[in-house]
Image: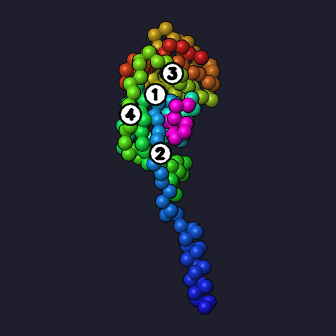
Amino acid sequence: MKKILFLTLLCLINYSCSNDVDESEVVSMRVNHYQTTAIGLSPQLVLMVQEGNAIGSSEWSYLYEGISGFDYVAGKTYDLTVKKERITNPPADASTIQYSLIRIQSTEEIDADVSFKLALKINGENFVTGTSQLSILNEIDITCTSFCEELQTKLQDQDFVYGTFKRLGLQNLELISVE
């Protein structure tokens, strides 16, 4: 009898400590037409997403890890169906959630005249790189025409700098104001 009780207790402990529980669900997600700047382990560009009931609202979340199987193209808003999986033992400082593309439901091309705001410097962390050709983290070129000097001065003097942009191409933005 003690053996049975011991084995039962051992099974319960093993089951309660198991990390192999499959926690996944299929969710709807919207991906915004531009990436934004953020600080994860280091400064980076991240996707802006809405999930489930938040789709269509003004609230966007940052997705640092991306979506497996999804090839993002700037200038388009995507409505997706994705698999959302909980990761039981992620690496240190990594997300506990992993997204995988199931299907692209729709894609909408966004007019190049639509403006949007990006943080260019957050709490002293500068996202603008380059000297003769400015860019955001060496990934997206900035055409600043009449705002280049003002931008560089604010990047030197302020801890927080924001720019409003319009899209010139896939990897090129036009700075239309700086604050």
Q: Is 119 situated above or below 91? A: above
The quarter of the picture where the N terminus appears is bottom right
Report, in whole angstroms, how far the alpha carbon at label 3 lies from the one at label 1. 8 Å
For the question of whether residue 149 can be seen, the reply is yes
Q: Is residue 80 left or right of residue 148?
A: left
| Mark 3: amino acid | Phe
Check disc 3 and report the residue beneath it. Answer: 116
What element does badge 3 sit on? Answer: strand
Give yes or no for contact between labels 1 and 4 (Cβ–Cβ under 8 Å).
no
For the question of whether residue 43 can be seen, the reply is no
Give residue 37's position: percent from left, percent from top: 52, 30
Give yes or no for contact between labels 2 and 4 (Cβ–Cβ under 8 Å).
no
| Mark 2: amino acid | Val
Report, in whole angstroms, how far the alpha carbon at label 3 lies from the one at label 2. 27 Å
Give yes or no for contact between labels 3 and 1 (Cβ–Cβ under 8 Å).
yes
Check disc 1 and report the residue beneath it. Answer: 34
Name which of mark 4 and mark 3 comes first in the sequence: 4
Check disc 2 and report the residue beneath it. Answer: 27
Magenta span contains residue 164: no
Q: Is residue 174 left or right of residue 122?
A: left
* Label placed on residue 8: none
Report, in whole angstroms, how far the alpha carbon at label 2 lies from the one at label 1. 21 Å
Foreground mark, 2 or 1, reads: 2
Q: Nearer the viewer, residue 66 or 146?
A: 66
Q: Nearer the viewer, residue 139 or 111?
A: 111
| Mark 1: amino acid | Tyr
Check disc 4 and report the residue beneath it. Answer: 106
The local crowd at label 1, few if under 14, some if 14 to 19, many if 20 or more residues have their Cα within 10 Å, is many
Report, in whole angstroms, how far the alpha carbon at label 4 lies from the one at label 3. 22 Å
